Image (tube, rainbow, N blue to C red):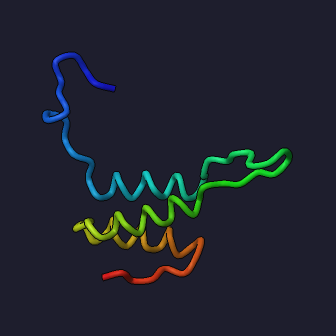
Amino acid sequence: MEMPGESEQERPAATDMEVALFYATHIDNPCVAEVEPGKFANIRDFYLREAERALLTMKEPSARRFLELKIGEYGEYKDIE
């Protein structure tokens, strides 16, 4: 939510740990959609792929390690460096 007088440029960027926590939350609790009558699917795979992409830009070692471990809980983490 933008505060009065606050612009996109004034808002601080998210830290690596904030990004890691965002993806971890969505990996653990992905959205679910009904893809056919009575058939439901979640989008965990999407969040796993996006989390792996986010690792490419992370510089904070503890955030990287946390997210690598979270990805590893749901599939084999492949070091992409």
Residue lying furthest right: 38
Residue 26 place in picture, x, y as percent: 53, 52
Name the image quarter holding the N terminus: top left
Residue 42 horizontal side relative to residue 39, left or right: left
Task: Provide residue 74's location: percent of width, then percent of height.
Answer: 59, 71
Q: Residue at x 74, y 49 (%)?
A: 35
Left or right of 25 on screen, residue 80: left
> 76 above or below 35?
below
- Name the residue nearer the viewer: 79 or 15: 79
Q: Which residue is farthest front?
A: 36
**Quarter of the rendering containing residue 11:** top left
Judge from the rendering whether residue 10 lies leftward or rightward of residue 2; answer left or right.
Answer: left
Q: Quadrant of the C terminus?
A: bottom left
Position of residue 11 relative to residue 80, above or below, is above
**Residue shown at 35% from the left, 54% from the top:** 19
Q: Residue at x 60, y 52 (%)?
A: 30
* Residue at (60% x, 55% y) in the render: 43
Q: Position of residue 33 (x, y in %)?
A: 69, 45
Q: Name the foreground residue: 15 vs 41.
A: 41
Q: Nearer the viewer, residue 36 or 20?
A: 36
Number of labels in the image equals 0
x%, y% of residue 4? 22, 16
